[in-house]
């Protein structure tokens, strides 16, 4: 019965683990709904301001903002948003693979790469690559606030303004549905126009009080909205991925318990049969 006792201990241990993964699945499901609400609330503003900024790039103002100036890319900046915790499947791994591919491609072209890292997992991973990290932050929680991000991204904006970075890319996960999250790398600076074919060739806005004042303000709001949208998208992705991962872990634990229970029953049955054989053999000898 020593073998059966050991198996019984394993079953008990796996059942305890299953309780933990089940609880984590339920917590992630609850947080995911709230994260989705924040993500959906932020999307319309982020998409609209992206279109407006794209239109401004094609306008003809007297003042050309530094964030709209294109120049040969010698230095690439990446803002990478990851999770603070693990146990969310391949969410961070897929994002890091996409980011590393972009980094290697840029380095092959002779470009220097500088990083801004948001999230503990990104900080831990990319510091090992030995690339310059201009700024980093972590522990934003399940409800990211733009105030916690402004200082970090301002370092990258100042570097772009001072021509220390020639292109700035934002890397984060995008929520598609509960089962699907994809890594996305989008150019933030210089500003891109996505619906260029629909715009007139020569046109402009009327600025009051001045183009400089308005563009300085609206471009900062644009950067804040894009990074904040990336942060809330990433939280929704994290909760969905963790819920799926913990459900898979709970199901696998259930299967393992069933297999061990069968082995335990066979071991117990073998032990009982052996004891009966010994009793019958002893009785026959008497």
Image (tube, rainbow, N blue to C red):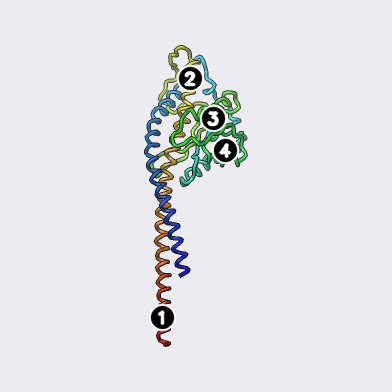
CA separation, marks 1 and 4? 74 Å
Q: In this view, does 274 lie above or below 198?
A: below
Numbered disc 1: secondary structure: helix
- In terms of sequence position, does the residue under pointer 4 or pointer 2 come before the other? 4
Residue mark closest to the camera, 1 vs 4:
1
From the image, tell me which residue sits under label 2.
Answer: 217
The mark closer to the camera, 3 or 1, is 1
Secondary element at tag 3: helix
**Is residue 214 depicted above or below 18 in this figure?**
above
| Residue, far top | 209
Q: Mark 1 points at which residue?
A: 279
Q: Residues within 10 Å of mark 1 (few under 14, many from 20)?
A: few
Residue 127: image x %, image y %? 59, 39
Residue depicted at x 51% and y 27%: 150
Q: Which of marks 2 and 1 is in front?
A: 1
Looking at the picture, how far across and down is residue 160, in whole percent?
57, 26
- Can you tell which of label 4 and label 2 is closer to the viewer? 2
């Amino acid at each position: 019965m020593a073998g059966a006792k050991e198996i019984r201990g394993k079953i008990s241990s796996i059942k305890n683990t299953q309780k933990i993964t089940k609880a984590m699945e339920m917590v992630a499901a609850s947080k995911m709904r709230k994260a989705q609400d924040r993500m959906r609330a932020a999307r319309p503003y982020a998409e609209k301001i992206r279109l407006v900024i794209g239109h401004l790039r094609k306008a003809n103002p007297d003042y050309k903002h530094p964030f709209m100036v294109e120049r040969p890319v010698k230095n690439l900046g990446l803002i990478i948003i990851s999770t603070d915790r693990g146990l969310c499947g391949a969410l961070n791994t897929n994002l890091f693979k996409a980011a590393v591919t972009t980094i290697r491609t840029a380095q092959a072209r002779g470009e220097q790469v500088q990083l801004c890292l948001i999230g503990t997992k990104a900080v831990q991973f990319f510091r090992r690559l030995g690339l310059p990290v201009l700024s980093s932050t972590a522990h934003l929680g399940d409800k990211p606030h733009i105030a916690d991000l402004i200082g970090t991204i301002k370092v990258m904006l100042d570097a772009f303004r001072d021509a220390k970075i020639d292109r700035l890319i934002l890397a984060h996960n995008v929520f598609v549905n509960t089962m699907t999250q994809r890594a996305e790398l989008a150019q933030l600076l210089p500003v891109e126009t996505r619906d260029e074919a629909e715009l007139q060739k020569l046109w402009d806005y009327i600025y009051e009080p001045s183009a400089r004042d308005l563009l300085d303000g609206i471009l900062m709001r644009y950067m804040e909205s894009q990074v904040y949208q990336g942060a809330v998208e990433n939280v929704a992705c994290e909760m969905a991925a963790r819920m799926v991962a913990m459900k898979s872990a709970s199901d696998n634990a259930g299967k393992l318990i069933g297999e061990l229970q069968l082995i335990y029953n066979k071991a117990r049955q073998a032990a009982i049969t052996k004891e009966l054989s010994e009793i019958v053999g002893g009785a026959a000898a008497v």
